[in-house]
Amino acid sequence: MTTERGLPEIGSKFVLPSRFGDLEFEYFQPKSSNIIKIHLPGEGIWACLSDADMDAYRDDDVIDPPEKIRIAVLRNTSIHGFPWGSCIPIRMRGPDRPEAAFDIFDGMEEPPDVVLNQHDND
């Protein structure tokens, strides 16, 4: 389901194909209070987390195993070409900045469209 502007409705589900199988996520409303920097290869970039993932980010003891994937929504355009609003897979790294988890696409010809497409422009 999409809004009049063609953006996903809050609470709508999307599937992210990965080497771990299909991962299902729920689109969330980005909030300015949940914006942090995440680590992409070669850069730090502003992104927004869900409320639950923001709680995990604040807990320095949370270190995600390889199969645990979270979604961050970019709040600026990456030097790698990922546009504002892209949904990027991430993992928490304890007290360190969360890191993009692009290794979940290893063995795939290219990342799925859900990562490369803009999902919001607010």
Image: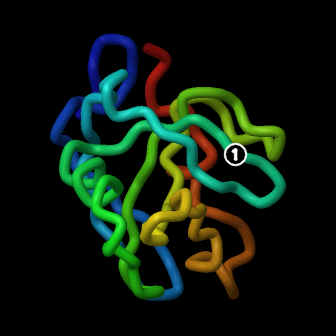
Residue 42, percent from left and from top: 83, 55
The colour scheme used to paint the residues is rainbow
Q: Residue at x 40, y 55 (%)?
A: 71
How many marks are shown on the rendered structure? 1
Quadrant of the drawing holding the N terminus: top left
Q: Residue at x 22, y 52 (%)?
A: 55
Look at label 1 and name its amino acid. Answer: Gly
Quadrant of the drawing holding the C terminus: top left
Residue 101 vs residue 115, the one in the foreground: 101
Q: Quadrant of residue 11?
A: top left
Q: Is residue 109 visible?
A: yes
- Please give the residue where the numbered disc 1 appears in the rendered image: 44
Residue 109 against residue 30 in the figure, above or below: below
10 Å crowding of disc 1: few (<14), some (14-19), many (20+): some
Residue 23, percent from left and from top: 34, 72
Q: Residue at x 74, y 38 (%)?
A: 78
Question: Which type of secondary structure does the marked residue at label 1 adopt?
Answer: strand
Query: Is 104 left or right of 50, judged from the image as shown?
Result: right
Q: Residue at x 28, y 54 (%)?
A: 53
Residue 80 vs residue 94, the one in the foreground: 94
Residue 76 against residue 16 in the figure, above or below: above
Residue 9 against residue 15 in the figure, above or below: above
Residue 44, percent from left and from top: 70, 45
Residue 121, percent from left and from top: 49, 17
Q: Is residue 22 visible?
A: no
